Image (spheres, rainbow, N blue to C red):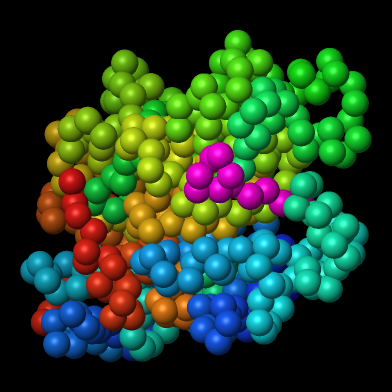
Amino acid sequence: MTLQNTEKKPMLQMNNLSKKFTLHLQHSTELTVLQDFNLSLNPGECVRLSGPSGMGKSTVLKLAFGNYRASSGEILVRSKEGQLLDMTQASARTVLHFRSHSIAYVSQFLRVIPRVAAIDIVAEPLLESGSGTITLEQAREEAARWLTRLRIPESLWQLPPATFSGGEQQRINLARSFIKPRPLLLLDEPTASLDPSNTQTVIDMIVQARNKGIAILGIFHDDAVAQKVVNRTVVMRSLNSNL
Amino acid sequence: MNDLDATPPLMRVQSLSCAYGKRNVVRDISFDLWPGEVLAIVGESGSGKTTLLNAVAARHTPSAGHVSFDLRHQGLQNIYEMSEAQRRMLARTDWGFVHQNAADGLRMNVSAGANVSERLMALGQRHYGQLREQAIDWLERVEISPTRIDDRPNTFSGGMRQRLQIARNLITQPRLVFMDEPTSGLDVSVQAKLLDMMRTLTRQMNLAAIVVTHDLAVARLLAQRMLVMQNGEAVETGLTDQVLDDPQHPYTQLLVSSVLQP
């Protein structure tokens, strides 16, 4: 793939995207958190969403993942087959297909599942139905590699992560996402509760993903981290679209 | 992507309505379900969710609308236009039904082993050794000790009965399972075990399921998609995380905001 080619082929494009919440239980109060937002993200590029809290940075990631439903505008994501598809119009099944093959999202907090061991939570994306013929043992081996890289002690692998520390849970969340690379990666504060050595590991992981051609959209509060991984910054201001 | 949407669904429900006398309890509900998908039907008591489940499972004749199921080799067929024999065959092979009260789905006065292998016997399997072997395999898969194979379910705890009911249904490798409040009335620890098991089994078997529950946490854990019912109508549908994290309808917002956070 030449650079020119990739420049012509954004992985993610948001056009005039708006998100408004209507709070029916509070006298139908309307909260506009994003208005006419535009963004284009190419393969191999890491874009930072920056700006003070409450400017809709996390909302942009949730919209791109299909977790929040857009009020208006387009969210075009490139499919495995190479076409741009508008996520705001896609069926539930199509969004699931995209999450399985095209979009990975690392939220700030791990959603723990009762009784399920850390290693199986990490291995799970590889075992989703329709993901291929990988066996449970192979998926666990791969999970073990990521847990090792992220310095989760082996004594914790068979435990459900509900009782883990914030930093450990965050690393489980990262491992669970990186185990199955997808061409669009959304990162919400991936190093927020990590110590310096784990932060460095995550920086390395992000840079490697970027160099492999993965398109990354992230929120990084830590400027030192951002400097090492980011190509471009989009500053979000109070309800004004920019760039 | 066109390919994805062109694949026929496993079940198609179109404009389904159900009435008790003059009272409409399910109104104009439509959805498609694909292989391996778990759909949660949520809503408060009396919203019509169990009636909807019974109607799509051929247990309650609807007053209007269609329910079609993808029969092997025949494609989508209207289940209410099949012969009674065909429907019964479907119910004991490709479908499963897990009742809220395990006593409704089990034979309480015969052994656990007989409960688990009954569907195989109904399909003509007669070899005692093989039946017993498969029963043991399924008891182990639902984490019931095979030493209990000759015990009757009335000696089992609530959680074990529910797991036995699941084994009894899944032994014929169905493609679709209906579940009516499968975890309600169980202790939370027992519930967690059952949920974990259902997640694993649906994934391993590429099993589709329609699960009625009033518990949004159960829906979040088990289901990819969700249908919210109020007064017999589907007021909101979507991916489970969309509906729970960004509820649009006033009633869904009320449901989501009413959940107690432990």
Side of B70 where B225 appears, left or right: left
The residue located at (39%, 32%) in the rendering is: B190
The residue located at (56%, 39%) in the rendering is: B103
Magenta stretch: includes residue B96: yes
Side of A186 where B92 appears, left or right: right
Does residue A47 show up?
no
The front one of A111 and B252 is: B252
Q: Position of residue B138 (x, y in %)?
A: 66, 26
The front one of A122 and B151 is: B151
Q: Position of residue A38 (x, y in %)?
A: 32, 83
Magenta stretch: includes residue A23: no
The image quadrant that residue B240 belongs to is: bottom left
Number of numbered discs: 0
The front one of A3 and A65 is: A65
Does residue B214 show up?
yes
Query: Residue extending furthest left?
Result: A52
The residue located at (68%, 19%) in the rendering is: B136
Side of B219 where A52 appears, left or right: left
Residue B66 lies, with reference to residue A220, above or below; the image says below
The image quadrant that residue A47 belongs to is: bottom left
Q: Position of residue A107 (x, y in %)?
A: 29, 53
Report the quarter where the C terminus of chain A lies. bottom left
Residue B220 lies, with reference to residue B23, above or below; the image says above
Query: Residue extending furthest top?
Result: B147
Q: What is the span of residues highlighted in magenta in the rendered image? A: B94-104
Report the quarter where the N terminus of chain A lies. bottom right
Q: Position of residue A236 (x, y in %)?
A: 17, 76
The residue located at (90%, 26%) in the rendering is: B126
